[in-house]
Image: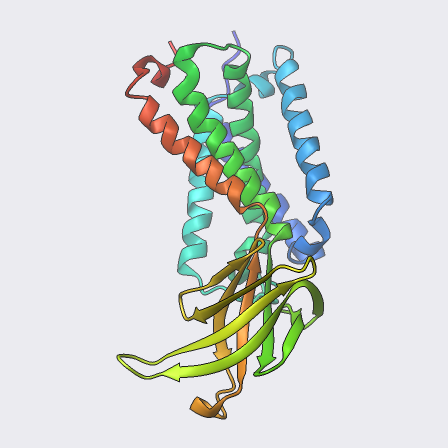
Amino acid sequence: MRKSWGLTEGSLVCCGWIAVGMLLQLLTGPIRWDMLAWPVNAVILSALLFGIVLIHLCRSRFRLFRWMATLQAGIPAMVTCAMMTILLGVTRQVPSGHVPADPIGITAMLSFWPFVLSYVWLMLLVGMVCMTRLFRPAWRNIPFLLNHLGIFIALVAGTLGNADMQSLRMMVQEGKTEWRAVDARHRAHQLPISIELHDFAIEESPKLSFLSDVTVHTKSGFTMRDTIRVNKPMSVHGWKIYQYSYDESKGSMSDISVFELVRDPWLPYVYLGIFMMLAGALTMFVWPAGISGK
């Protein structure tokens, strides 16, 4: 009888993905997420889902495919992703879209090939685990499926959705309206929304804070007036508008306000995945058998 693959093989596979990632990092540089934006990421997602279904259907013929749905494959993958995430947390990262500050690329982890491939591998394994339960429907599997489908959705949205996230800066002068913003590479973008700045002010009590009285216009004719403060952004049609800076050379006399505009269309799906994980944890108390799947 053949010995089934275990944690050692799982660790070796993870090391292999890291090695492949390092090779891609050296040959191609950091991942260009702008090249994977919609609809490219939708095609990648379709290919991923098709691959998961195909691997599941062929699992009886290939020991590798059966092993991919086991803890022996999943635990090393989770440990690898956890270590990568810790490295992300303890390393000072450059702003999104900037060139890494180190020769390897760990200061731009979200575009670091080993980091992304490690999460893609974990995503594939979680998808395989979900397939094994989806093809064996039972009430006791509900907590398990909620947890693992939630993880899968959050991973997919957080990884592939990164390509569609926009973080732009817009400079607006009092009495004027601006439709253009620039990205981290100083490329100009014509936006579907504009900001009209009525007044910029700096409050010094009880602590220094600055705010902008603005009206946001959309090309569809929608308008909204509000005051944007530090840590109090304005949300309009999927965009979050943050008070970022001002003309510091003029101080309190500044008539220019700088805004950061962030758009992440995949973020609701990340929240959906997190909500499903929480729901799965709660339903474990209702369906205790779902923990073991017996």
Check the image and report above or below for 208 versus 139. below
Q: Specify whether residue 143 is in view.
A: yes
Q: Residue drawn 52% across and 43% down?
A: 268
Question: Residue 91: which quarter of the image?
Answer: bottom left
The outermost residue toward the left is 206
Q: Residue drawn 53% across and 11% down?
A: 2
The outermost residue toward the top is 1
The picture places residue 8, in percent across and down from the top left corner, at 46, 29
Q: Residue drawn 45% across and 70% down?
A: 227
Q: Nearer the viewer, residue 73 or 256?
A: 256
Q: Nearer the viewer, residue 30 or 184?
A: 184
The picture places residue 124, in percent across and down from the top left corner, at 57, 31
Q: Specify whether residue 68 is in view.
A: no
Check the image and report above or below for 208 versus 39. below
Q: Residue drawn 28% across and 21% down?
A: 285
Number of dots carrying numbers = 0
The picture places residue 54, in percent across and down from the top left corner, at 68, 20
> Position of 94 compared to 140: left or right?
right
Q: How is the image coloured?
A: rainbow
Q: Nearer the viewer, residue 288 or 89?
A: 288
**The C terminus appears in which quarter of the rendering?**
top left
